Image (tube, grey):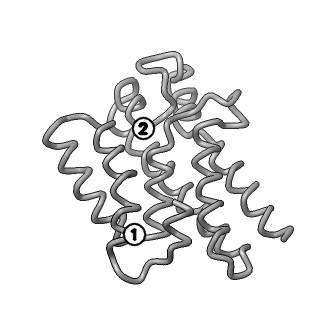
Amino acid sequence: MILQIAAIVLSYLLGSISFSVLLAKAIRGIDIRQHGSGNAGATNTLRILGKGPAIAVLLLDVLKGVAAVWIGIWLSDGSAWIPALSGIAAIAGHNWPLYFHFRGGKGIATAIGVLVSLAFLPALCAGVIAILSIVLTRYVSLGSLIFVAFTPIFILVLPGYSMNIFWGV
């Protein structure tokens, strides 16, 4: 039980690392949350700092979601719930980061990492639809919503996925 709680707490603390805030401070000496949309995420990083830093933030935020799920797997003692809860904790950490006065991003990139780790094929199917919607409409937020909404649907529809993942997602 202690290791399972530790997995969730560690995942929240990992999620609280705001790569957007850290890169903006390192590159331009600014708090990215005071520029553009005010959001500490990859899209605002793209607007303010450009493609390179935005890609770095996107990848790092996705990787912290992946890492959180794996922390949950390693410390879960076989429970299917702990990896999902660890992923949710990382997303919560991204959205309300302990290290940055609880002002973070929207958690989409971290959610992508979590969902891809928990249910690769459903996340891939939802991701393709989300990317198509972004290409067609030029609205990243619409694509994000489509991804987050469709992944659980694909978990239900595609064979071989546990209902624990569905309820955890």
Image point (33%, 76%), residue name: 158
Which mark sits nearer the N-terminus, 1 or 2? 2
Image point (45%, 45%), residue name: 108
Image point (26%, 50%), residue name: 130
Amino acid at circle 1: Ile
Q: Residue furthest left?
A: 136
For the N terminus, the image quarter is bottom right
Give how far across and how far down residue 89 sits, in percent: 65, 52
- Secondary structure beneath label 2: helix
Q: Is residue 80 left or right of residue 115?
A: right
Amino acid at circle 2: Ala
Give how far across and how far down residue 119 sits, in percent: 44, 70
Kindly identify which residue carries mark 1: 155
- Secondary structure beneath label 1: helix
Give how far across and how far down residue 126 sits, in percent: 30, 59
Q: In front: 47, or 116?
A: 116
Kindly identify which residue carries mark 2: 42
Q: Is residue 10 left or right of residue 108?
A: right
The answer to which quarter of the image holds residue 151 is bottom left
Image point (48%, 68%), residue name: 117
Q: In front: 102, or 156?
A: 156
Question: Could you tell me how far apart the alpha carbons at marks 1 and 2 are, in whole angstroms?
Answer: 26 Å
Mark 1 Cα-neighbour bin, 10 Å: few <14, some 14–19, many ≥20 = many
Q: In front: 85, or 17?
A: 85
Mark 2 Cα-neighbour bin, 10 Å: few <14, some 14–19, many ≥20 = many
